[in-house]
Each structure stands twice: as C-alpha cells, then as structure tokens.
Amino acid sequence: MKAVVLLDFWACPFGQRCRIALAEKGAWPDRAPLLPADPYARAQARFWADFVDMRFFEYGSRLWKLKGEAQAAAKEEFILILKLLEGELGAKKYFGGDAFGFVDIALAPFVSWFYSYETCAGFSIEEAAPKVAAWGKRCMDRKSVANAVSHPDKIYEMVGVLKKRLGVE
C-alpha cells in the first residue's frame, strides 16, 4: 500500500481538516465513522460544516483583514455566528454528541486562529461563546487535532505578515 501524500500549507485550516480526518480514520474507511448513520443527522452535519466554510471562515478572516467600522461590523457578525454554533452545540461534548465527527473536524482547525481573531478584533471568544471555547479546548486535547493544527502564536505571527502585505497595519 502506498502512503497518502497531502499537499497543503501549514496554516491552511482545510489541509488541517484532512490531517485530522486521516488521523481519526487511520486512513481506513470502516474505522471511526465521521458522519452519522441517520440520513437526517448526516444532512445536518453537512449543513453545519458548510456553515463553517461559508460564514465562520469568511467573517473570521474579516476580523484581521479589516479596520475601523468594517471590522466592528465583522466582529458583531462573527459573535452572532459563534452564538449560532453554540446553540447547535448545546450541552453536547462534540457537535455530533459524544462522538467527535464531521462538524468538529470542519471547525477544529480554526481553534488555533481564535487568538488572532480575539487580538485583532479586541474581544474574547470565551466570553462571547463559552461553550464553543470549552469545545475548542476539548478538541485540542485530542491527539488527532493537536498534531494537525498550528500553534496560535505561529498563526498570529503569520497574520501579522499578511496584514502588512495587505496594508492593514
């Protein structure tokens, strides 16, 4: 059997997702199902993963790409997004309940970006969405996530370089 080769950029949350999923699956399709067996629950998981891609990623990027009123508006929208995710998470350990799954893998790489979002936009994710912050800590305790995502300080350093390049600084 040939080894799987993943081509990605160290800070890319989408490549990190692949690394997390491969670690969870051991690269075997019958190990650790990531999507629920129930069709309705599978559809919901796909919806929330798409929500992360379309809303969380977009507004998270705006927190460090923008300044002034535009950044303040992005921060308000981002906090609403966090609250929606918190509502979906509820009292569950993971978005799939007790099992780490598809939605968790979609969102987990962004945990290492939390520090950059907070620092650039001047707010606390733990204060705005304590359940999401606690979920993020649980995810970082998982070997598959901890080994796949970059350190928050390294992400913040890269964000600083990007901000200079974009003329945001």
Image: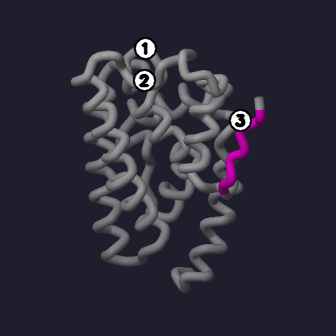
Percent x, y for residue 119? 53, 59
Q: Mark 3 or mark 1: which comes first in sequence? A: 1
Q: Looking at this view, is 31 or 76 the one in front?
A: 31
Crowd class of label 1 (few under 14; some 14 to 19; many from 20; radius 10 Å): few
Q: Which amino acid does label 1 sit on?
A: Asp
Q: Give the range drawn in magenta.
A: 2-8
Residue type at mark 3 is Asn
- At x 59%, y 46%, the residue is 112
What is the C-alpha distance between the residues marked 3 and 2?
19 Å
The residue shown at (37%, 77%) is: 68
Residue where numbered disc 2 is placed: 94
Q: Name the residue under label 3.
A: 147
Name the spot of residue 22 as percent of width and height, x first: 62, 32
- What x and y, as percent, mark residue 85? 31, 38
Residue on which the image places disc 1: 98
| Residue at disc 1, secondary structure | loop
Q: How crowded is mark 2: few (under 14 residues within 10 Å), some or many (20 or more)?
A: many
- Amino acid type at circle 2 is Tyr
Q: In which quarter of the image is residue 38?
A: top left
Kindly give the residue lying farthest to the left in the view shown.
Answer: 40
Which quadrant: the C terminus? bottom right
As measured in the structure, the alpha-carbon distance from the residue carrying label 2 to the one carrying label 1 is 6 Å
Helix, strand or loop at disc 3?
loop
Q: Do the residues labelled 2 and 1 touch (CB within 8 Å)?
A: yes
The residue positioned 77% from the left and 29% from the top of the image is 1
Look at the image and say whether residue 155 sits in the magenta stretch: no
Q: 29 or 33, which lies in front? A: 29
